[in-house]
Image (cartoon, rainbow, N blue to C red):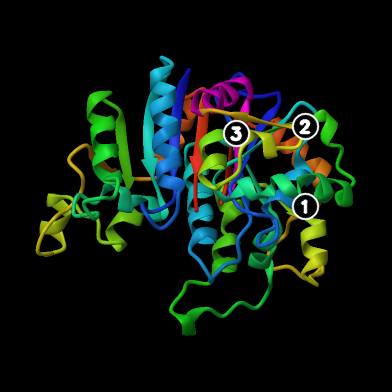
């Protein structure tokens, strides 16, 4: 019973990602949407500081929210992949619960 | 285990906002009470700024608000008994678990993760 | 799968309304069913037919209206959230003696029980907030 976590704000001005990382467990997916996109540059450091093992988590960004903000897939670290809207729906189907951190 | 035999679902509410600065905390409580009226298996978790709702001695009348902690005190009347507060969130806000407005069970991140996984639906507000 | 979508945020104040709309469109395009869209808290503003965006702006409220009508989705605006934010149907406008009503034709006003009920009959509940 894994969970899709969606995060829509940046960790420098909210505790959303911190809280999400505290309760995300192996097999879960963290999908960064809206201003959550800006976490792509800091997610790895934040997780390391919290002692959170990212390797067991799937990390994604919503493609159109990424490119809207002047970033591209080539700017993503290896462990983060981009999904389109259909991919977002597929993730919601693949995980039992969806938790929106907003 | 989810969706037990009686057809009830496990509905979890993670209340993570302070009580009066926005309407979210009140809205979350309204959702909890609605779910309880529908006789669902309800779990309420106070996390992040949500633990500030547990501050005792709230006197919100002068800001034309209803005392939220008084409303929280009604939870047992709705048979909402699974009420948790995140210990780490309390500690970071200088709050003490023996000085809270209502009786709650303390929990850690592992417990919240477990609650989420055992839920059919999770609302964070 | 059967989805319920919950929207807590007003249009234009944040991206959340558009995110929810795009998710709903994508889910329907994949053949999923949307059991109910529940507009709660500031989300009720998405059901105000009096919203008039600038000509060069995307008309979110009408986009919701079209989606709901075309796909015959049950759309509920939370009555307690809506009334205090000035979103009224004709009946409430008469009852509270207000000068007009503005609830979107495709939506109805109802209580939080409709969200609980939707949770019980859906496979997935996906929320969007600001």
Q: Is residue A16 left or right of residue B29?
A: right
Q: Residues within 10 Å of mark 3 (few under 14, many from 20)?
A: many
Q: Position of residue C91 (x, y in %)?
A: 13, 51
Report the residue at 43% width, 38% height from top: C20
Dot 2: what SS?
A: loop
Q: Residue at x 86, y 50 (%)?
A: A50
Above or below A54: residue B106: below
Q: Which residue is mark 1?
A: B105
Foreground disc of the pair 2, 1: 2
Residue shown at 38%/26% (left/top)? C35
The chain letter under disc 1 is B
What secondary structure is marked by label 3?
A: strand
Please report whichever mark, 3 or 2, sits nearer to the chain's N-terminal start. Answer: 2
Q: Read off the magenta span.
A: A85-102
In front: mark 3 or mark 1?
A: 3
Task: State the residue position of label 2.
Answer: A78
Both on one chain, marks 2 and 1?
no
């Amino acid at each position: 019973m894994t969970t899709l976590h969606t995060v829509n704000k940046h960790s420098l001005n909210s505790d959303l990602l911190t809280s999400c990382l505290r309760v995300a467990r192996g097999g879960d997916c963290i999908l960064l949407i809206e201003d959550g996109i800006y976490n792509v540059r800091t997610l790895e450091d934040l997780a390391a500081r919290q002692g959170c093992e990212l390797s067991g988590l799937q990390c994604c960004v919503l493609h159109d929210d990424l490119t809207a903000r002047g970033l591209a897939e080539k700017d993503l670290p290896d462990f983060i992949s981009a999904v389109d809207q259909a991919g977002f729906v597929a993730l919601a189907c693949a995980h039992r619960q969806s938790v929106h951190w907003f | 285990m989810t969706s037990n035999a009686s057809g009830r679902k496990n509905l979890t509410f993670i209340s993570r906002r302070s009580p009066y600065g926005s309407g979210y905390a009140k809205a979350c409580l309204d959702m909890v009470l609605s779910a309880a009226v529908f006789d669902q298996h309800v779990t309420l978790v106070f996390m992040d700024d949500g633990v500030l709702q547990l501050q005792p001695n709230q006197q919100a009348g002068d800001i034309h608000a209803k005392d939220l902690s008084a409303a929280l005190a009604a939870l047992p009347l709705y048979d909402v008994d699974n009420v948790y507060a995140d210990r780490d969130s309390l500690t970071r806000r200088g709050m003490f678990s023996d000085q809270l407005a209502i009786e709650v069970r303390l929990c850690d991140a592992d417990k919240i993760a477990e609650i989420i996984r055992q839920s059919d639906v999770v609302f964070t507000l | 799968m059967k989805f319920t979508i919950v929207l807590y945020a007003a249009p234009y104040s944040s991206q959340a309304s558009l995110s929810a709309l795009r998710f709903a469109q994508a889910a329907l395009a994949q053949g999923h069913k949307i059991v109910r869209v529940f507009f709660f808290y500031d989300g009720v503003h998405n059901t105000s037919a009096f919203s008039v965006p600038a000509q060069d702006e995307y008309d979110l409220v009408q986009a919701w209206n079209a989606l709901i009508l075309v796909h015959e989705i049950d759309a509920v605006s939370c009555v307690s959230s809506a009334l205090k934010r000035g979103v009224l149907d004709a009946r409430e406008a008469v009852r509270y003696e207000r000068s007009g009503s503005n609830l979107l034709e495709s939506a109805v006003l109802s209580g939080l029980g409709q969200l609980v009920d939707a949770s019980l009959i859906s496979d997935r509940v996906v929320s969007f907030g600001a």
